[in-house]
Image: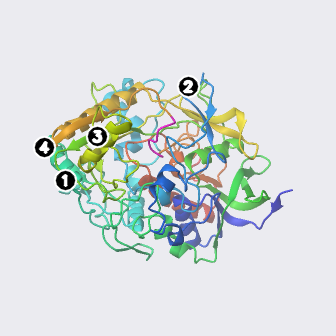
Amino acid sequence: MAKKLREVDVVLVGFGWTASVIAQELTDAGADVLALERGGWRDTVPDFSVTHIQDELRYAVRKQIFEETQRSTLGFRNRPDQLALPMRELGSFMPAAGVGGAGVHWNGQNWRFLPSDFVLRTHNEQRYGKRAIPADMTIQDWGITYEQLEPYYDKWEYLCGISGKAGNIGGKIQPGGNPFEGPRRREYPLPPLKRSAATMLFDKAARDVGFHPFPAPAANTSQPYLNSLGVQMGQCTFCGYCEWFGCANYSKASPQTTIFPVLLKKDNFSFRTHCSVTRVLTDSDGKRATGVAYVDRDGNEYIQPAQMVVLCAFAHHNVHLLLVSKIGTPYDPKSQTGVVGRNYAYQVSSSVNVTCKERLNPFMGAGALGQVVDDFNGDNFDHTGKGFIGGGYIALWNTGGRPILQEYLPKGTPKWGAGWKKALHEDYLYSTHMQCHGAMMAYRNNYLDLDPTYTDDYGNPLLRLTFDFYDNEHAMSKFLTDRATDIAKAIPNRGINPKPREGHYSIIPYQTTHNTGGAAMGNDPRTSFVNPFLQSWDVPNLWVMGSTVFPQNPGYNPTGTVGALAFWAADAMKRYIRNPQPLVQT
């Protein structure tokens, strides 16, 4: 028998970036907020101490701070006519488990989406005609515009202490920044990170071939910084342990380094760890969420009543909770009806390895220390006759040449043995790597649903992922990789090794943890689960955060937009608390 607990105003499922933002904003407004986290407590001290966090084997190879697939996983297949099998070990993406979520292990590569990204279908139909969008491509507008979200991007950047160079302030292009970005109201809070030898080579080569490189916006602080909540952050020391690691130096933005010092002191905020939420509970007619059910680490079951429920977990987990809770209509690809699980998307990445003639310094780096070309992102270039829509950025990231996993070797190098060792020894200090980070459109047969065969620890059906790349993405990846190869050829080098994205999607090799969709936002309840304020169309006191709400995935890393949307939704929640009702009438 589940134990019923004291009701709270707001219960948050998950305690990562979005939950931290929502909790901070709503507690400031006077709400009693509780966060439930399925993982354990983590903080800079002692969990990210330099005495152990800079351990590539433990954290990057053995994945100690990530989700354990024996506790939580999903089934996967490329097509609806295939049998899905459970993912037995982490591969293509690595969900976090623990307080802080992915905000602990992310690189800090922080972006604003382009204005055209938010009106993707409308923009492409107007510029290229409706025939440019294939019949099985289910892309849609977001229901909000860049202009509406811009103040919240600004708020996020000043919370995190983003290091960068503005390219467009108030419509005026700024020298040294990204000339393709949407207008922003002011400069970044901090100047760009110091350049490395490899990024300077990339910068010169990109300019030589006619592109417009700029320093990547980074959630790694280039200087000591006092953020918008009065929290002090330290200066990045370029240790090279950002991606898949917690930051020991208080210099990578995370909930721990930006929000917790203020939030955790509040009497009207609390959190519980090792609590796995198994259901969102609703009233008898399913029109109002009444709270959540969860199981603690000892197997005890609880009911947590709440006036509002906010799903702040990883994209997959948010969708899984909606499906097992029977909230919203599950998506059916045959009839193309339903919204829960619809418009799942990912990222399309490729790379070019370069063995330079000049000696580099790969082992000093930061998660977002990079130089970027945005000439071919979104609709920054004419797609006429290209055979695809969408695009991506080309970047040279100097994230730190950690000894186990960095092996950017020349084409033809043996994969093991004496030849591999010789190449690694000779080329390590001369090797670098360019990444093409591309968009992913939404398609009729890319979706999430419940697996009919396999169940999890709590008897719920596993989530099932049906996903593959399409001709649009293969053409885009080849185009981006060719442009990156043009830059590579302009760098004095001893060898180039392009690696375009080819074939079917595989869940085995790591690609990105940029999983999106499944509970898309939009203006039409027939094609979206949440309205433009991230409020459920069907259950008005239920809200969904994070990349779960992306209708498709642009060519950027998602965290900057996830953070901006959290602030945007928090303002809407404050209005709802004052006057509980659907914020968009149907």
Residue named by callout 1: 200
Describe the element under mark 3 as helix, strand or loop: strand
Describe the element under mark 2 as helix, strand or loop: loop
Rendered image coloring scheme:
rainbow
Q: Outermost residue, left direction?
A: 208
Looking at numbered disc 2 in the image, what kind of residue is underneath it? Answer: Arg
Residue stretch in magenta: 507-513
* Residue at image coords 49%, 38%: 345
Residue 324: in magenta span: no
Residue 394, visible in the rendered structure: no
Name the spot of residue 156 as percent of width and height, x first.
Answer: 42, 62
Looking at the rendered image, the quarter that the C terminus falls into is top right
In the image, residue 24 sits, relative to residue 444, either above or below, namely: below
Q: Which mark is residue 79?
A: 2
Mark 4: few/some/many CA within 10 Å (<14, 14-19, 20+): some
Looking at numbered disc 1 in the image, what kind of residue is underneath it? Answer: Met
Marks 4 and 3, the one that precedes in the sequence: 4
Marks 1 and 4, the one that precedes in the sequence: 1
Nearer the observer, disc 1 or disc 3? 3
Looking at numbered disc 4 in the image, what kind of residue is underneath it? Answer: Asp
Name the spot of residue 433 as percent of width and height, x first.
Answer: 29, 44
Marks 1 and 3, the one that precedes in the sequence: 1
Nearer the observer, disc 2 or disc 3? 3
Describe the element under mark 4 as helix, strand or loop: helix
Residue named by callout 4: 208
In the image, residue 314 sits, relative to residue 141, either above or below, namely: below
